[in-house]
Image (cartoon, coloured by chain):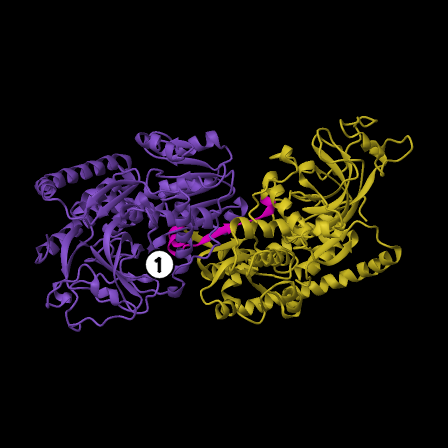
Chain colours: A yellow, B purple
């Protein structure tokens, strides 16, 4: 349970900090015939390789989602890229089949996630696919391998180049969608519960957003330990599903105070609290810990209010950010941990160990990713909206499968309606702000600034839009 | 390794928060003939019970160390108490054989430990001895049981009354001295390493004060896990001993920067750091953690400078106290934990579990308390001095064995010299302060205040001394 078993794979690439280049418009100054990399002779036989004389580097094209600027759902555009990305030593080229959406992607779109380079850039931290070419010195991956991929960014596209050490073989019988749903959520939940949390029999765990990707993974992982009590928050409509998934006590955070609800059942508090919310919820979590309890904070979802960056929400989150003195920790016998997989991207060995254990549990049938819904690349906005509005139960997935023609037509109609929708949303956002005003008169000044800032940003974005939209669909 | 095995003992007294009353001069309004408590008929046969008619409650006397006021080593006095302490339900009376000294006792003497009630009070968090009487409803202890005891305070005396749930049977073959050396240090080291630390094979651990009680316990416990690298700080003269004890890399913190020394060997940092120092050393520790590393802080030894409370040292420690924001923890993937057994005194079950595992390891020969030196109750000042001046390797123990007459005479001679010594110490302290002045001109003002405060306190103590010293030896 504790990740002691060293993984069988990828020890050769520890600490290799290469990053996927988003490969915007690769230059065609490369040699006309691709040099055959050692041990990768099959690369030439890749299914995407054209048969004629025109160099593949030039005819090769693929679709990619690109974040064009910080803002709402429409900031992620589908573009077509030309030219085959070059492979460096230790890298593989993956033909992507499915991609996972994560909360960090939503934060990134609003400019709230510092692990994503500035736009334009292709987001995406996880995907599944097939190895289509391997670079020099790659010995443990070959063309045709089905893999899942973890990367700092750049995976929401049909073709991705990543270090081989960032890929993991998909086990027999796992679909591409499941494989795209697994890495971030399960490694996150596993490392939080079993490394920082040191989860043991008879303990109690609070899982916020228990119907979300990490929530479901954490609940399943809690089931692998004897007599663990899981408290899970979710809106009431999701309670039946999460109960079936293993949540012992469901709490509707929208209508009830979760602290009170937990205290009713576990007056002394909890052993482990997973906190994706941040802000004042981290304070609550800390106070809800038993002696020897562990608070593991792994996000700041409270910063996300509306589809565009809400400076007020951000400021509030910073203002309420939890800060702790060691003497308080000593007197409480408590532990406060922070986790984010995005900041672990150099730790290939640690991640490989966790992945190895997670895949083992999958093999034993103890965990299984739950897919909420699958969307075409064209629908990425709707996919993000579903997740951000907390309407999902399980993982939201993007597929690179081409969209059927009739669906495309439907989508086009939707596009027309989007302008109206946008206006509506703006109204909604404004209404929310008005409601907020009533509640928080103190923050009046900050809000004014936030609005100004927002308008400025919108203006900037409008200007950017005026730039030539070459290749944009 | 992870304390999953439930202990066999004392589940019946969980959360029983009774505390040992220091039993200052118990009133003799108790019934003349002690009511025989259920299941404790043997109590009457206790070796200390006198044969004549005079009620035992009145003739019963015992020696006790009493902290008479905050200050230097001489504030802990040996006194004689009269009257047999009454037993409440669930309590046992222990004839104490040996007591352990802990850093918290030194802090307490200076008024820096809030778990000790105000003077006059008997200090002492751990001891070993023999059960001499049992109260009602005690089913798992009987007269004659050899036990070790953990209590919030009140154990530095010949007779102690404690909840039965605070006692643990001494295993066959363990001496009273070893038994008095074990509870605090080994439970502390065990819970830090295996609960918060989640220590696993191939990890690296920094143990400060590796020749101290917790340091030696932690080093031994690290040996129970495969391929753990232990970095241990101690002054050079102790290096051979701690190396033999299992420290992989010894560091002389007096002549070298331990951060640099660690980085030379482990450039990426460490998995676990046990920090008894506090202040700026906690900052260093945090920066020295690997991703997924755990910093466990369990004291503020940096506050102890000189034998009397040094307000400047205290202020500095507070000023430099480590405080951490959750977003930093997230970006670093780090854990900060606080531990102190003194604040866990209600957690009988947790402690019993840890003790059970520790005793199991002792049975397997994997751990063994190391006694530095044993002192008579009369010598408590010297015992404390040895520990505070870091001259010990292992545990400093007090024995309740009567002091041989010739030793007493020697001690008396020493007493005469003590006044001179005291003056000398005062000079030393003053010199230190002068040195400090040169280094820290900025703190001039604070220091002045500190001096004033010290003088005030000394005056107060002087006044207290003037009070009748009845029964004082």
**Furthest residue toward right:** A52
Q: Residue at x 37, y 47 (%)?
A: B186
Measuring from the top left, give residue A437's x and y in whole percent: 56, 67
Q: Is residue B57 above or below residue B106?
A: below
Residue span colored magenta: A326-343
Image-based side of B360 in relation to A355, left or right: left
- Chain ID of residue with mark 1: B
Up/down of A45 relative to A270, above or below = above
Residue A406: name its quadrant.
bottom right
> For this rendering, which residue is in front, A99 or B227?
B227
Q: Residue placed at 51% from the left, 35% from the top?
A: B268
Position of residue A443 measured from the top left corner of the image (x, y, whole percent) = 51, 62
x and y percent of residue B333 in the render?
Answer: 53, 46
Task: Examine the rendering and report whether any part of residue A120 can be seen.
Answer: no
Q: Residues within 10 Å of mark 1 (few under 14, many from 20)?
A: many
Q: Which residue is mark 1?
A: B345
- What residue lies at 24% left-to-right and 44% top-to-bottom? B447
Q: Position of residue A342 (x, y in %)?
A: 61, 45
């Amino acid at each position: 349970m504790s990740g002691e078993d060293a993984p069988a794979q990828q020890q050769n690439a520890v600490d290799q900090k290469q990053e996927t280049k988003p490969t915007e418009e690769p230059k065609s100054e490369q040699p006309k015939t691709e040099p055959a990399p050692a041990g990768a002779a099959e690369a030439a036989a890749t299914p995407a390789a054209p048969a004629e004389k025109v160099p593949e580097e030039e005819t090769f094209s693929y679709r990619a989602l690109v974040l064009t600027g910080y803002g709402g759902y429409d900031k992620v555009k589908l573009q077509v890229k030309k030219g085959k990305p070059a492979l460096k030593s230790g890298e593989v080229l993956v033909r992507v089949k499915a991609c996972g959406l994560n909360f960090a992607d939503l934060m990134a779109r609003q400019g709230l996630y510092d692990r994503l380079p500035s736009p334009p850039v292709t987001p995406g931290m996880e995907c599944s696919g097939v190895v289509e070419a391997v670079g020099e010195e790659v010995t443990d991956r070959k063309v045709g391998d089905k893999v899942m991929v973890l990367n700092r960014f750049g995976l929401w596209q049909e073709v991705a180049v990543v270090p081989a050490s960032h890929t993991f073989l998909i086990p027999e019988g796992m679909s591409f969608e499941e494989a795209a749903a697994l890495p971030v959520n399960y490694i996150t939940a596993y490392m939080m519960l079993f490394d920082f949390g040191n989860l043991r029999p008879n303990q109690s765990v609070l899982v916020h957003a228990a119907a979300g990707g990490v929530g479901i993974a954490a609940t399943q992982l809690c089931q692998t330990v004897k007599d663990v009590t899981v408290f899970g928050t979710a809106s009431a409509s999701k309670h039946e599903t999460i109960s079936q998934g293993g949540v012992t006590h469901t709490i509707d955070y929208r209508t009830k105070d979760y602290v009170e609800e937990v205290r009713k059942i576990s007056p002394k508090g909890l052993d482990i609290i997973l906190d994706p919310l941040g802000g004042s919820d981290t304070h609550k979590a800390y106070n809800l810990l038993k002696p020897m309890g562990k608070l593991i904070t792994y996000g700041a979802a409270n910063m996300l209010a509306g589809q565009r960056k809400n400076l007020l929400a951000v400021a509030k989150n910073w203002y309420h950010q939890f800060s702790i003195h060691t003497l308080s920790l000593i007197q409480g016998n408590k532990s406060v941990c922070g986790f984010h997989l995005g900041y672990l991207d150099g730790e290939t060995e640690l991640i490989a160990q966790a992945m190895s254990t997670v895949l083992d549990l999958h093999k034993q049938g103890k965990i299984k990713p739950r897919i909420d819904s699958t969307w075409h690349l064209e629908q990425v906005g709707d996919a993000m909206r579903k997740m951000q509005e907390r309407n999902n139960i399980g993982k939201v997935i993007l597929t690179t499968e081409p969209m059927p023609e009739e669906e495309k037509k439907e989508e086009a109609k939707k596009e027309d309606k989007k302008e109206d929708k946008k206006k509506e949303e703006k109204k909604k956002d404004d209404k929310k702000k008005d409601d907020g005003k009533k509640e928080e008169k103190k923050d009046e000044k900050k809000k004014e600034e936030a609005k100004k800032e927002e308008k400025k940003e919108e203006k900037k974005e409008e200007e950017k839009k005026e730039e030539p939209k070459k290749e944009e669909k």
